[in-house]
Amino acid sequence: MAGSTHTVTNQPPPLLGYDVYGADRALVDAVERHLDPGLLEEARSELSALGRAAGSAQLHEWAIQANAYPPVLRTHDRYGLRVDEVEFHPAWHRLLGKGVGAGLTAAWVRPGGHVRRAAGFLVWTQVEAGNGCPLSMTHAAVPALRADPALAAEWEPRLTSTIYEREMRPAHLKAGVLFGMGMTEKQGGSDVRANTTSARPLAQEGTYELTGHKWFCSAPMSDAFLVLAQAPEGLTCFLVPRVLEDGTRNVFRLQRLKDKLGNRSNASAEVEFDGTWARRVGEEGRGVRTIIGMVAATRLDCVLGSAGLMRAAVAQAAHHCAYREAFGGKLLDKPLMRNVLADLALESEAATALGLRLAAAYDDGGEQERALLRVAVPAAKYWVTKRCAPVVVEAAECLGGNGYVEESGMPRLVRESPLNSVWEGAGSVQALDLLRALRREPQALNACLLEVGRARGADHRLDAAIKDLLTDLADLEGAEARARRLAERFALVLQGSLLVRFAPPEVADAFCASRLGGDWGATFGTLPRSLDLGALVERARPVA
């Protein structure tokens, strides 16, 4: 018989059994704002179905299993033959299959596909972020392959399929495939032009033999990879299939899996090419230009993934505080905790609004929107991914000691939170890319100023921030040392302009007062007392 001291009280119920999409008012608003009205009913149905799956106890358990049993490298079989395979827990395959089945690699072939996928990706990241890597790489490979129409015609239907086939066999025998990417090398890092992997032309036009080492290869269990290597005319993009058409395995030697801080369920590898067969994508010597479309799409996914992690953390914190009592009342009702939660909710909503706006630019596809992306993507990737870690850590603290315990799920979010700032070009790379676009492409700056200008006159603090940004932009000579500051300001005025135009007044007011008006401290929970903090918290709280 249990003693009376074993009675558990004052603990919140698990945040399970609810629609992760439908409970996120900022995300629902963004989808309805950017999606064609004729697509809304279908999109709501799809996203709510995905949201209910994401909020289920079953998928929560799969996520725990996928991280508790990380991937294992098998270089050889029992007979000593080289196989170079990565083994995953069945839960990983179930999660990845659901992500593919939900259309998270199919944006390019669906009406409104990028907004719908962005919302789905943001929801899906909240379940388990590790399987987001192959989903992102597969999605992002499409624009790179379109540099070669014949390759695109062959591979795009498989990439955008909603069928997940995990077996390793020739791609032409599969209904759906996954793609990975290999750019980073030991000597170069982000400086891909320093890559030393070589590509020797073969007799068949467009085919090559690769020799070299990739220090970081994403999703090594994929069916094919886009890689960069030095061809006779310079750095070039190549497609490397895992299995050749005759059923033999390409030379793709996995040296080891990276032992990462977070993202434990996902495999990242070092890989050796030694006479590896590859097909050229695009022209020789134009590898960066060819693969940049893939890089831009994955960078947007870093923004969406960080927005998803922030939303998951804020939802858990608000849910906990709605039930937990201390000092004579609910934590949610305590003025200081309400300030912290409202501040976190602001950061989460601003990230969501910006991520969905950029996805809508992809759907539009017009020249003006493409120009906007060239400036807004690096600025958003710089700022939103850097805000993720402090938001998640503060949200975990809202749970007190419970948030430091693995069973709460918060430590996994904390370990994941710095990832998107590092992958696909760390902070300084993004700031320098923004600076490069501003110097080389005046139309990109004009598109960005037109975007923020749509909100001018609606809030004096936003107007002042735009004026300060224009002052900074007046002199771009010697701007490298202040490129991070420039990227931050760009992202903040973009977020502010979106919230002023579309968010509830209390959200826009709080953002402009704190992020643009300077009435804010160095930590969360320092919003001015004049704001309607209760409305911000209630908007962010998930209702299970």
Image (spheres, rainbow, N blue to C red):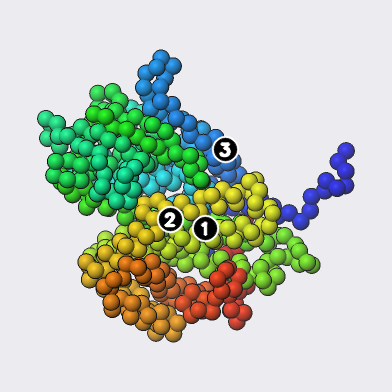
Frontmost residue, 309 versus 386:
386
Which residue, given by chain and number where applicable, does mark 3 sit on? 68
Residue furthest to the top: 79
331 relative to 74 in the view: left or right: right
Side (left or right) of 322 relative to 192: right
Mark 2: give few (<14), some (14-19) or many (20+) Cα within 10 Å.
many
Q: Is residue 92 above or below residue 285?
A: above
Horizontal and vertical percent position of residue 311: 53, 58
Is residue 470 visible in this depiction of the protein? yes
Indicate the quadrant where residue 20 lies: bottom right
- The residue at the point 28 percent across, 48 percent down is 192
Q: Residue at x 14, y 34 (%)?
A: 201
Residue drawn where x is 33% and y is 27% of the image? 169
Residue 160 in view: no
Identify the element where label 3 is drawn: helix
Spot occupied by residue 143 in the image (x, y as percentages of width and height):
26, 50
Q: Secondary structure at mark 1?
A: helix
Say which label, 2 or 3, has the lower sequence index: 3
Residue at 58 percent across and 58 percent down: it is: 393
Q: Residue 306's spot in the image, x, y percent? A: 47, 56
- The span from disc 2 to disc 1 (Cα, nearest Å) is 9 Å
The C terminus lies in which quarter of the figure? Answer: bottom right
Residue type, label 3: Ala
Q: Could you tell me the amino acid type at mark 2?
A: Ser
In the image, which disc is placed on residue 421? 2
Give the residue at mark 1: 389
